[in-house]
Amino acid sequence: MQEALIGRLKEVLSDVMEKMFYMVPDDLEGESPSRDGEYLAEISIEGKRRITLQFLLPESLAKQMASNFLPGGEPSEEMVQDVLREMANMVGGNLISGMGGDWRLGLPQVHQGVEAYGAGLGREPVCEFDVEG
């Protein structure tokens, strides 16, 4: 079950990143250079069990995503966070649409700086990507 879920998550995340943000994610080869990220977007899905999806992103990637999604100059901090919430919502929604059963999507949240670091403490990533675009 977990392997299938991770495979589906990779497909959904790749699809959302390509179609909505014009970015191509590739599986990260080797170890992550750093687990530091300026932003952590998360969303929970609940059904047979509770799953929390967390996306740790460096500031440069978050701003590029916002610029690609909402063209028109340098994105404000509010715009960056709105785009990250929307990304978490799109990934979570697309993930549960293919899972069958009765799943509910929680509200997306974004943490920044120290909050992002604290929210991700003690959690090991199940998949990591290198993003180009």
Image (cartoon, helix red, strand yellow):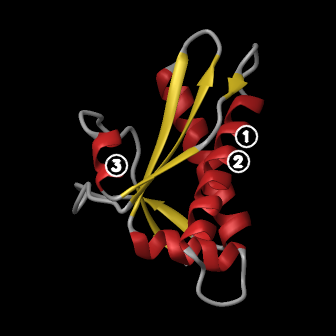
Q: Is residue 26 left or right of residue 18?
A: left
Secondary structure under badge 1?
A: helix
Residue 7, position as x, y percentages in the image = 54, 37
Tell me the amino acid under the disc marked 2.
Met
Residue at the spot of label 2: 90
- Residue at 31% x, 59% y: name it: 29
- Residue at 23% x, 60% y: name it: 34
Residue 36, position as x, y percentages in the image = 26, 58
Q: Nearer the viewer, residue 43 or 115?
A: 115
**23 shown above or below 111:** below
**83 shown above or below 132:** above
- Residue at 24% x, 33% y: name it: 122
- Residue situated furthest bottom in the rendering: 73
Q: Earlier in the sequence, mark 3 or mark 2?
A: 2
Tell me the amino acid under the disc marked 3.
Glu
Q: Nearer the viewer, residue 97 or 104?
A: 104
Q: Earlier in the sequence, mark 3 or mark 1?
A: 1
Query: For mark 2, does the 10 Å Cα neighbourhood hold few (<14), some (14 to 19), or many (20 or more) residues?
Result: some
Where on the picture, by quarter, is residue 87? Answer: bottom right
Q: State how far apart marks 3 and 2 are (Cα).
A: 23 Å
Observer-side mark, 3 or 2, equals 3
Q: State how far apart marks 3 and 1 are (Cα).
A: 27 Å
Tell me the amino acid under the disc marked 1.
Asn
Q: Which mark is residue 115?
A: 3
Secondary structure under badge 3?
A: helix
Q: Is residue 27 left or right of residue 64?
A: left
Residue 56, position as x, y percentages in the image = 40, 53
Observer-side mark, 3 or 1, equals 3
Q: Is residue 56 left or right of residue 69?
A: left
Q: Disc 2, disc 1: CB below 8 Å?
A: yes
